Amino acid sequence: MQKRSIVPILYILFLLLPIYWLVAMSFKTTNEILSGFSLFPQTFTLDAYRTIFTDPTWYWGYINSIIYVSLNMVISIAVALPAAYAFSRYRFLGDKTLFFWLLTNRMAPAAVFALPFFQLYSAVGIFDTHLAVALAHCLFNIPLAVWILEGFMSGVPKELDETAYADGYSFPKFFFTIFIPTIKAGVGVAAFFCFMFSWVELLLAKTLTAVAAKPIAATMTKTASSAGYELGLLAAAGTLTIIPGAIVIYFVRNYIAKGFAMGRV
């Protein structure tokens, strides 16, 4: 084995070790986890997974998360597409300043916006709804999506637009039937990063929900019982939380690679 192949292998093992440990813990009881160190479950059990799939508090946490994450992705991409097109095709007074201002939202921590969003959404009556969390996450995801999509759109020559207009295409027809398919890799990359932020973000999701739209991350923080924390249940929930991200990464992996090649990811 060549020396240069050892480093990547060690790095991959280093990354996979916590995931393996999490999965192994999910098949153990809390008492076994606390009793000592073991690479494999001594008493294999599926009780934690059985609890998650039968207790509405748990499985609705996953459903709620999927709903508001999907809603956020749709809103973010729908808003970012025309905005990114404008930044890539037109020059206007203050365009660079506006573009930079959009990105500054990504520089502020979510905690800065938690209280304003809580008061605003409580006043308009959308507190504890999927829409509340989706809209709050748009503050962070739309600027990122605009930045990613603008890079992909700038790589498309303007002659494509001019040719389509010369052939009699209206702008909506050109945009949806020709232009968007041309930058579908960028749409995939933008959707992936919107998904990842919205899926793992906890503070806003927990602050803006109570019962009806509580996400799985908030549910995982409330596993204490009279006997202490249910570590096996937490590990099982964490294992299931990884799966949606892994599925999304699998389907957009080629688009992400193209984004890295373009220097936009």
Image (cartoon, rainbow, N blue to C red):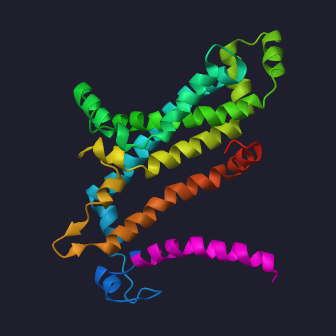
Q: From this view, report whether residue 77 is shown above or below residue 45.
A: above
- Quarter of the image with the N terminus in it: bottom right
Residue 213 visible to an observer of this rendering: no
Question: What x and y, as percent, mark residue 228?
Answer: 22, 74
Question: What x and y, as percent, mark residue 72?
Answer: 46, 37
Residue drawn 33% across the image and 70% down it: 233
Residue 145 visible to an observer of this rendering: yes
48 sits to left or right of 78: left
Q: How many marks?
A: 0
Residue drawn 49% across the image and 61% down it: 242
Main secondary structure of the magenta stretch: helix
Question: Which of the 4 image quadrants contains residue 163?
Answer: top right
Nearer to me, 82 or 120: 120
- Quarter of the image with the C terminus in it: top right
192 sits to left or right of 222: right
Residue drawn 69% across the image and 36% down it: 184
Question: Which of the 4 image quadrants contains residue 14?
Answer: bottom right
The magenta stretch is 1-25
Nearer to me, 23 or 229: 229
Q: From this view, report whether residue 183 is shown above or below residue 27.
A: above
Question: What x and y, as percent, mark residue 169?
Answer: 75, 13
